[in-house]
Amino acid sequence: MVTETETQTQTRPGNVRFMERLNEVWEDYLALWFMLPMALFLVVVTFFPGIYNVYLSFTHWDLTEPTLNGTFVGLDNFASAWSRGSTWVSVRNTLVFVTGSLLLQTTIGFVLAALVAGVTSRMRTIYRIGFILPMAAAPVALATMGQIMLNQQIGIIPYLIETLLPVSSPAFLSGEYSLVTVMLVDTWNWTPFMFIVFYAGLTSVPTELKEAAKVDGAPLWRIYAHVIIPYMKPLIFVAVLIRMIDLFREFGLVYSLTGGGPGTSSRLLSIQIFEMGFIGSNLGTAAAVAIVYLVFVIALCTLAIIKVDFEGVWN
Amino acid sequence: MSALTTDRKRQLKEVGRHAVLLSWLLFALFPFYWITTMSLKETADALAIPPEWIFVPTFENYLQLMRDPEFAYALANSFLVVGGSVLIVLLIGIPGAYAISRYDIPAERDVMIWILSSRMLPPVAVIVPFFILYNRLGLLDTRVGLTFMLTTINIAIVVWVMKAFFDGIPEALEEAAMVDGATRFQAFRRVVLPTAIPGIIAVAIISFIFGWIELVFSLVLTGTETRTAPIYMYQFIGSRQIDWGMLAAASTVLVMPIVLFLILVNKYLAAGLSFGVALKE
């Protein structure tokens, strides 16, 4: 048997043998070939910016005086970046923006999902589709819409508030309200995300589970607190985590709606970095903020993932 | 008597439920209505307060928009760059997800978190190093450069969702094919991939949406050659003489493809947006 196969192989031309060999290597190490492009790509996009930001933050990098670029300046960039009041204002704004938006979107999203899940008529589909559409608003388009609709003189929303309600409309885009306004606009934009994920979770809660609790005569809020929410916990955690990650990434909507202003009233850390690096042309100081921001966000998310290490998500 | 009151109570509750839901529906859809009608008004009426609720629609704003070759160019650029990045992210993400799902990968959980970490990096923090790198490589203001950066936004979502999707496809399917003489790769290509098509379409569309609405990378990396549609619009913001009617038309054009996409994938949206976790419930 063995000799027969060998003679067969020998009679075949070399290039066929080579192709067979290649095919074997391909099949035998399929997992490796499948992983390799992704892994290489991820090494570039995760490690490179982190390491290079560290390097940049300790060196002179100014687009307006490129001759000095690359010289080691110690902690100068950090000192310059973190001694500015605007940096600390943007830290505060970012924390307020992320926490506030997250709370609003999670609560509203959950309530809407619970209400829609209880609808039995055909209206259910209308709500389900209608509610997700705000996600379609691209930041620049949404900012344009916001500037038109919220404008104190010509905007429809102040007009409607003053016509329908017995109060005067707040000046949405003024320094006093701009941070709240961007939170509300983001909530309009992204509550759909929370809604759709929670809705999927709520409709997948086994009916027997709910029925059993109902038979016991438990009031609705107790069914939610003791049966439904514990059942959905992994999903709620993931939804909040993803939304939090994306809120820390936020730049486009706020930058094009208010530009971080008036003044620094709605300036987020992402806007601060952008202004330092690409408006102020100082990439070194921008990196000194960016690296802190990177480490903070990664640490926070990783901590959250490790802390709430539950089944479900991983298997 | 008591049966009647419980009936009344239930009815009242239903009325309350629909009142809340209808108000939110109005709130969610009103901006779309407003911006669309505004794009169809004459410039003089567009910003009238009190608003002109009833008007004769005109397509003048859209015609004007289409006459601007820069807009068409930016729109085409957006489709090219975002489409290209979706193709790349699928090509590298799907095989990776399959390998993680089917093979024993050491420290699988850590690998998954590492993949997710690519999404955690705030784009504005990532772009500074890439700006300098691109400057050296001559990749600023090129489609290739922007396509690459857009891919980074979606790699995590593609791998996470597709892994969850592959986890849900029984391995017996491939084993059966392999008993019939197929190799592992053939089993993947001819059996697993076709089964996963709904997931692939959903994740492709979601990736397209995230790429389409992206702003930081395009703001920093593009120039006149590669300006995308959001950047085309961005240049009008803040300028003194804004043609609001035309801007409303541009907004509508920018948003409408995504509205269609969302309706198309609405069934898979939860699974896709929750990085595949909702798929396991």
Image (cartoon, grey):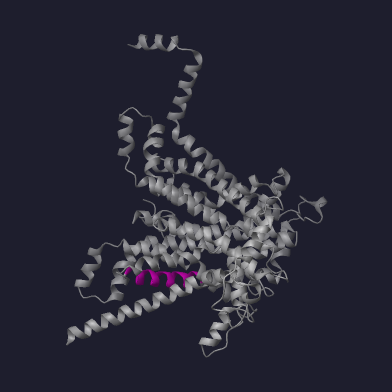
Q: Quadrant of residue A29?
A: top left
**Residue A96 visible in the shown view:** no
Image x and y of residue A155, in percent: 60, 78
**Could you tell me which residue is drawn at 64 percent across and 66 percent down?**
B246
Quadrant of the image containing the N terminus of chain B: bottom left
Relative to the observer, which residue lies in front, B173 or A21? B173
Image x and y of residue A212, in percent: 21, 68
Asked if residue A259 is positioned above or below residue B141 in the image, the reply reads below
In the image, farthest residue toward the front: B56
Bounds of the magenta segment: A101-117
**Could you tell me which residue is drawn at 47 percent across and 37 percent down?**
A34
- Whether the magenta-drawn stretch holds residue A236 is answered as no
**Residue A31 visible in the shown view:** yes
- Whether the magenta-drawn stretch holds residue A114 is answered as yes
Image x and y of residue B38, in percent: 58, 71
Asked if residue A192 is positioned above or below residue B98 in the image, the reply reads below
- Viewed as shown, does residue B259 lie left or right of A62? left
Please name the predominant secondary structure of the magenta segment in the image.
Answer: helix
Q: Quadrant of residue A127?
A: bottom left
- Viewed as shown, does residue B249 lie left or right of A189? right
Relative to the observer, which residue lies in front, A164 or B163? A164
